[in-house]
C-alpha cells in the first residue's frame, strides 16, 4: 500500500504553517478552513511550488519533498481552470502526453477516454471559449488525469460555479475518484462539500490542524470549539440558562446542533423517545424561516440566541425545547 504521509513546516514573517496528516492509498481527503488558514499554502508545499523549511511528503517509501517538481507525479486542478485558450479541448487534455512525447494517435485516444470519464463525449474539437464553467472544470480535471499522477490536488475547484452546478460536479468528482482509485487532496471552504464527498476531513485553523476525522465524526463529535462552529451551525450556551442538564461541569459552555433540539409546546405530553434529554424553557421566538423541508427558528433567552431546526412551525411565540443529552458537547471557551 502506498500510504500518504505528510508533515509540513513553513515559516513566514507573520504566519507559521505546521501540519501533519496521513491517508490510505485511494482516499479522498478534504482540507477545509477559513480564508488565510493555510489551505492553498499546503498544496503549494506538496507540489514543490514553495520549499519546505522542514518535513516530508511521502507516498509509500518515496519522499517527494527531495524530488524536483516535474518528478513528483503530482497533478493539480486550479480554481481558474488554467486551460490553454488557443488549443482545442483534445489538445488541452493531451498536452501532458505531448510533453512526454507520446505519439498523436495515442494522445488523442487517451483524451477521448478521459472525456468519456468526465462525461463530455464528443467534445474533442470544441474551442475552450465555447465551454461553460462546469465544462471547463471537467476538462481541467481530465487534463490533470492525463498525466497519470500518483496524487491529485484540487484547489477549490468549484468555488466559481453556481450552487446547483457545484452540487452536480462534486458528485462527479467523487464518481471519478471512485472509478480511478486515485488519492486526492481537495481544498474547499464549503462545509457541505467537504462532508458530502470526503473519506477524511482535515480542519485547519491559523496554520495548524484543529481536527482530523471522517465527516460524521467531525460533525457529531468535534474535539474543539473551532471545529464545532466551523463545520456547521450550532448553539453555544452558558450552562446556567438550562433548566436541566445531565451534569454540571465546573467550566465552560454547552454546544449542540440546531437539529438536536425538539420543540415542545405542550409540556404535559411525553417526549416521544426513550433517550435522556435536557430542557430549555421560556425561549422567545424571534424569527421563523421556511427552508423547504424544514423551518429554522431563531429564539432568544437571557440575551442568548438559539437556533433550532424543526419540521413544524411553532404556534406560540414562547417555546421550550428538549435537547438530546448525547448530542451535548462542553467547551471551556
Image (tube, grey):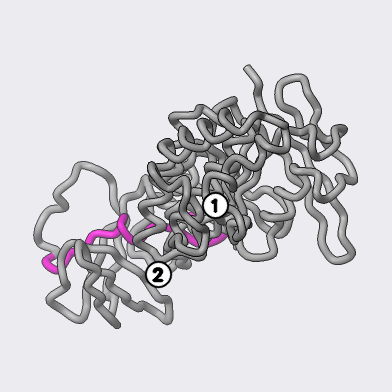
Give x and y (percent) for residue 332: 59, 59
Q: Secondary structure at mark 2?
A: helix
Question: In whole angstroms, how far apart are the C-alphas of marks 1 and 2?
Answer: 64 Å
Give x and y (percent) for residue 96: 67, 39
Q: In the rendered view, does 293 fall on the left or right side of 300?
A: left
Can see residue 136? yes
Mark 1 = which residue? 88
**Residue at the image position 35 percent from the left and 49 percent from the top:** 325
Q: How many marks?
A: 2
**Residue at the image position 71 percent from the left and 21 percent from the top:** 60
Mark 2 = which residue? 241
Look at the image and give the residue range highlighted in magenta: 248-266
For this rendering, which residue is in front, 212 or 303?
A: 212
Q: Secondary structure at mark 1?
A: loop
**Is 256 contained in the magenta span?**
yes
**Residue at the image position 47 percent from the left and 45 percent from the top:** 124
For this rendering, which residue is in front, 117 or 176?
A: 117
Establish if 260 lies above or below 23. below
In the rendered image, which quarter is residue 3 located in?
Answer: top right
Give x and y (percent) for residue 104: 61, 33
Q: In the rendered view, does 226 fall on the left or right side of 120?
A: right
Q: In the rendered view, does 267 fall on the left or right side of 282?
A: left
Amino acid at each position: 500500500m502506498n500510504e500518504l504521509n505528510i508533515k509540513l513546516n513553513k515559516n513566514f514573517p507573520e504566519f507559521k504553517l505546521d501540519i501533519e496528516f496521513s491517508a490510505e492509498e485511494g482516499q479522498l481527503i478534504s482540507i477545509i478552513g477559513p480564508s488565510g488558514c493555510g489551505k492553498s499554502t499546503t498544496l503549494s508545499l506538496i507540489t514543490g511550488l514553495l520549499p519546505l523549511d522542514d518535513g516530508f511528503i511521502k507516498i509509500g517509501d518515496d519522499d517527494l519533498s527531495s524530488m524536483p517538481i516535474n518528478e513528483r507525479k503530482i497533478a493539480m486542478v486550479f480554481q481558474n481552470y488554467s486551460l490553454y485558450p488557443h488549443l482545442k479541448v483534445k489538445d488541452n487534455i493531451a498536452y501532458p502526453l505531448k510533453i512526454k512525447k507520446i505519439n498523436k494517435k495515442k494522445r488523442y485516444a487517451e483524451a477521448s477516454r478521459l472525456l468519456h470519464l468526465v462525461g463530455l463525449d464528443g467534445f474533442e474539437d470544441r474551442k475552450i471559449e465555447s465551454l461553460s464553467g462546469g465544462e471547463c472544470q471537467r476538462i481541467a480535471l481530465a487534463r490533470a488525469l492525463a498525466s497519470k499522477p500518483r496524487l491529485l490536488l484540487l484547489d477549490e475547484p468549484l468555488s466559481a460555479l453556481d450552487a446547483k452546478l457545484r452540487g452536480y460536479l462534486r458528485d462527479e468528482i467523487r464518481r471519478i475518484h471512485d472509478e480511478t482509485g486515485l488519492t486526492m487532496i481537495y481544498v474547499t471552504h464549503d462545509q457541505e462539500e467537504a462532508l458530502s464527498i470526503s473519506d477524511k476531513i482535515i480542519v485547519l485553523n491559523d496554520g495548524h490542524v484543529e481536527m482530523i476525522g471522517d465527516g460524521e465524526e467531525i460533525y457529531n463529535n468535534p474535539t474543539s470549539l473551532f471545529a464545532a462552529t466551523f463545520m456547521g451551525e450550532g448553539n453555544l450556551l452558558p450552562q446556567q440558562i438550562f433548566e436541566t442538564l445531565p451534569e454540571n461541569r465546573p467550566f465552560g459552555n454547552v454546544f449542540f446542533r440546531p437539529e438536536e433540539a425538539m420543540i415542545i409546546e405542550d409540556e404535559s405530553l411525553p417526549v416521544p423517545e426513550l433517550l435522556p434529554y435536557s430542557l430549555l424553557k421560556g425561549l422567545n421566538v424571534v424569527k421563523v424561516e421556511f427552508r423547504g423541508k424544514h423551518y429554522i427558528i431563531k429564539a432568544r433567552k437571557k440575551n442568548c440566541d438559539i437556533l433550532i431546526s424543526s419540521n413544524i412551525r411553532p404556534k406560540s411565540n414562547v417555546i421550550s425545547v428538549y435537547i438530546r443529552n448525547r448530542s451535548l458537547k462542553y467547551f471551556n471557551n
